[in-house]
Image (cartoon, helix red, strand yellow):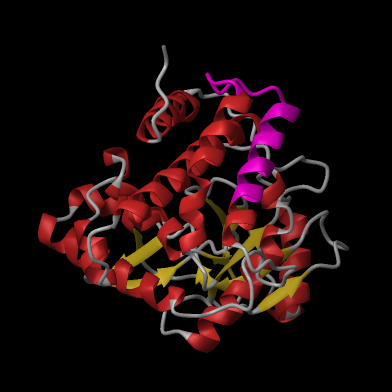
Amino acid sequence: MESVTKNRQSPAALRAMVERAYGGGRVPVGEGWATELGHGWFNVAYRVLLRDGAEVVVKIAPPSEVEVMTYERGAMAVELRMLDLLRTHTSVPVPVVHFADRSRELCDADYFFMPYIDGDNLGVVAKQLPAAACDSLMEQVGAFNREINSLRGGAFGPLDGPGDPSWRRVFTGMVEDVLADGERRGVDLGWDYDTVRTVVDVHAGSLDEVTEPRLVEWDLWAGNVLVRDGKIVGVIDHERAFYGDPLIESGFAGTQMESFGFPVPFMRGYGHPELTGTERVRRRLYCLHLMLIMVIETVYRGHTDSRQFDWARIRLDESMALLGRTRR
């Protein structure tokens, strides 16, 4: 996916970054040693063949002058913290960070190196797999997601604070940040912004049921899962993590909106029963929040292709309808 947030670097800059990370003796020579990985939507990542034959990936944050959405600020620091948490406290297969540089001396953004994971992107190959094989992999996603959510935080909100004891305040604040981002850039939601605020406020009482902060991945969908031989070998892209309600996880979206796929294998792997009435309301709020992001981010990322915007606008209408508000 093309985006103005992708901070592409010259071969000379990439060589300097490799030298800082691994030393001069491993800097690539010749041509063809760096290949951009194309599945990401936010950061740019390169697959790099080092001089000794090892394959690594360098992930680079957006350029400092590019405006990102409020919740995306400092995303790479969040990812580095999340990778440490997952490696230390879970069995979720995540890459080791070889080297991270936040000095901004070699390029205008943070970056880090990690090993290249030899696996297929589940979001790409899922439709080519037998149904049973795909279901098995989604069960594994569910099990790993439950393990992530088993980690407790001291408060709701960012991984490194400041936190809040109220999930209601945190989540409604997240929605307000997204709406403010949209208003600032004049994004057409197809809905009056204050109407959206009213819908969220009407149903916000359902959020009070959540009293224990849990580690939330939030972006654990098929496109961030690498598989090989019927097993998950890597989970990538952890920059959106926070402490919140596990029900906000991507795998639960399909319980309320068919566009997000069949949720049963994920639910089975997670071990989650059918949602209660209050849980359904919360999940619908989370769908609305996600659809707001997917509409508004297209403007921030400078998309020239309108497909995501058009798709998300329709889904935004659906999520509003799920919360009782339809167009007259």
Residue at (21%, 67%) from the top-left corner? 268
Q: Quadrant of residue 100?
A: bottom right
162 and 33: which one is in front? Answer: 162
Height in image: 313 above or below 66? Answer: above
Q: Quadrant of residue 105?
A: bottom right
Residue at (26%, 62%) from the top-left corner? 266
Q: Quadrant of residue 140?
A: bottom left
- Looking at this rendering, what residue extends furthest in the top direction? 328
Q: Is residue 168 magenta?
A: no
From the viewer's perspective, is 89 left or right of 26? left
Q: Is residue 173 magenta?
A: yes
Residue 1 visible in this rendered orientation of the protein: no
> Residue 323: x and y, percent?
40, 35
Height in image: 220 above or below 302? Answer: below
- Which stretch is magenta? 172-192
113 and 263: which one is in front? Answer: 263
